[in-house]
Image (cartoon, grey):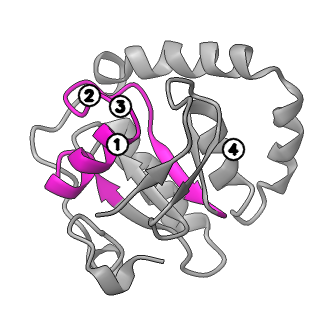
Amino acid sequence: MKLRMRAGSGSWAPRPVSGLPDSLILFDGVCILCSSWVRFILEHETSPRFRFMRIQSASGRALATALGIDSDEPETNVVIVGGNAYFKADAALAVLHHLKGYGWTRCLGAIPRPVRNWLYDRVARNRYALFGKDERCLLPSPALAGRIMDEPTESSMS
């Protein structure tokens, strides 16, 4: 996996990336909340757009490392949209903008990023205690199987 990022990658602000497929979501595959988020996305897409990568896979770990995320204790999910990596609350908003009935969430971008991320962090830090953890990664349903990109091929990269 080839990934090029601009300098200054220590921030959780959106940043340009290249060498990754558009609409890729990196998520914690053992987190019940995160797996529920994937199912929510699948149920609310107007057409199949997003693809998913579990951070527990070899490719997911490599991507997390390249993006400055601790793959053993991830504190954010990531979505790649339009050549940019979005983190924390920005990632959730970037996804919601593309789901049927959730375009209104664009207005939440007016809330300053530090405030949005503070709220995101409160949930993220307590997600296992609040929602649980499954020691096995999310097993893909037949509908999801073709959209899990744990081991992307060179031809799937854009």
Task: Give the amino acid type for the residue marked by disc 4 in the picture.
Answer: Leu
Between residues 58 and 37, which one lies in front from this camera angle?
A: 58
Is residue 43 a member of the stretch shown in magenta?
no
Cα separation between marks 1 and 3:
8 Å
For the N terminus, give its image quadrant.
bottom left
Q: How far across and how far down the image is residue 35, in percent?
A: 35, 48
At numbered mark 3, what does the secondary structure look like: helix, strand or loop?
loop
Residue stretch rendered in magenta on the structure? 53-82
Task: Give the amino acid type for the residue marked by disc 3 in the picture.
Answer: Ile
Between discs 2 and 4, the one toward the N terminus? 4
Q: Nearer the viewer, mark 4 or mark 3?
A: 3
**Residue for badge 2:** 132
Q: Nearer the viewer, mark 2 or mark 4?
A: 4
Cα separation between marks 1 and 2:
27 Å
**Residue for badge 1:** 66
At numbered mark 4, what does the secondary structure look like: helix, strand or loop?
helix
Residue, x 53% and y 60% (percent of image)? 41
**Residue for badge 3:** 69
Between discs 1 and 4, the one toward the N terminus? 1
Q: How far across and how far down the image is residue 3, in percent?
A: 40, 57
Left or right: residue 120 compared with residue 144: right
At numbered mark 2, what does the secondary structure look like: helix, strand or loop?
loop
Residue, x 39% and y 37% (percent of image)? 33
**Residue for badge 4:** 93
Cα separation between marks 4 and 3:
19 Å
Q: How far across and how far down the image is residue 90, in percent?
A: 66, 38
Cα separation between marks 2 and 4:
23 Å
Q: Nearer the viewer, mark 1 or mark 3?
A: 1
| Image position of 143 with respect to 108: above or below | below
Q: Residues within 10 Å of mark 1 (few under 14, many from 20)?
A: some
